Image (cartoon, rainbow, N blue to C red):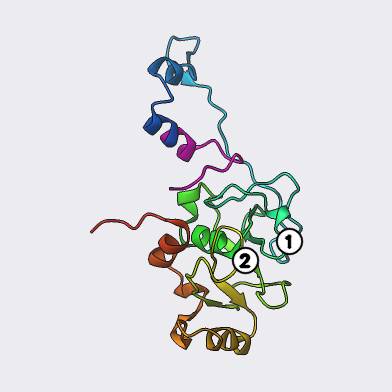
Amino acid sequence: MRRHSPNRTGRRSLLAAVASGAIALSGCLDDVTSSADGEPTDESTDEATFPDHPVDEPRDPPSDRRCDGPCGMEPINYPEWNAQIAHADGQGVFFDTPGCLLTYRHEPTFYDGPAAPIENAWVRDFRTKGLIDATAAVFVLDYDEERLEEPMAHNPKPFVDRADALAYVDSYDDLAESDIVGIDGFGAEQAHRYREYPIPED
């Protein structure tokens, strides 16, 4: 389903390894040692780390950073698509595409993101390729994987100008104005369709 990002080796990687049978019981016990009084202590230093972010403006993605969302690709290699989020504590997360950003934003804890709330987000305008405020943008929910060549097969198309979104929708028979949403119109169903995010069972 999700491809693990090498940035983090936390809860998700441990669960994935357990599920695949890669961790033996003896390996799990290696992180536990005894204190001076004989009580077990956990010496694991398995903490996620995130780059500093100025919070109120975008920054360049770090050159060695992999996507903090579901794919693990390097955002710096996708200058016309990459996106980013600043958490309120000054930590940043970076994505190669708007689809990864929106899926992460839907549920940051699922991707082991920083605990602090999301403060700001930026995506690339589909027409101009410039960074825009994602919270003020509109997104065309285009699910056609073969329409355009783009990273991760397909993505929602961000636009700073709703007129540009309407023009995009009008150029395809299978799209309609109802496919244009604000950032809060992106939920579990959309995340699942773009990045196979798991939809909770009723």
Q: What x and y, as percent, mark residue 107?
A: 46, 57
**16 in the magenta segment:** no
Q: Residues within 10 Å of mark 1 (few under 14, many from 20)?
A: some
Answer with left or right where residue 62 lies relative to residue 34: right
Q: Tag count in the figure?
A: 2
Above or below: residue 124 compared with residue 72:
below
Name the residue rendered at 38%, 26% in the picture.
21
Residue marked by disc 1: 79
Q: Helix, strand, or loop for circle 1?
A: loop
Name the residue rendered at 65%, 67% in the picture.
122
Whichever of labels 1 and 2 marks the residue nearer the N terminus, that label is 1
Q: Helix, strand, or loop for circle 2?
A: strand
**3 in the magenta segment:** yes
Disc 1 to disc 2, how far (Cα)? 16 Å
Residue at the far left in the pictured view: 202
Residue 135 in view of the camera: no
Q: Nearer the viewer, residue 30 or 188?
A: 188
Q: As shown in the figure, which amino acid type bears the numbered disc 2?
A: Ala
Residue marked by disc 2: 121
The C terminus: image quadrant: bottom left
Name the residue rendered at 73%, 54% in the picture.
76
Name the residue rendered at 62%, 60% in the picture.
85
Q: Residues within 10 Å of mark 2 (few under 14, many from 20)?
A: many
Q: What x and y, as percent, mark residue 12?
A: 46, 40
Q: As shown in the figure, which amino acid type bears the numbered disc 1?
A: Pro
Q: What x and y, as percent, mark residue 35?
A: 49, 13
Above or below: residue 107 compared with residue 122:
above
Q: Which residues are magenta?
A: 1-15
Q: Dividing the picture into quarters, in which one does residue 187 lie? A: bottom left
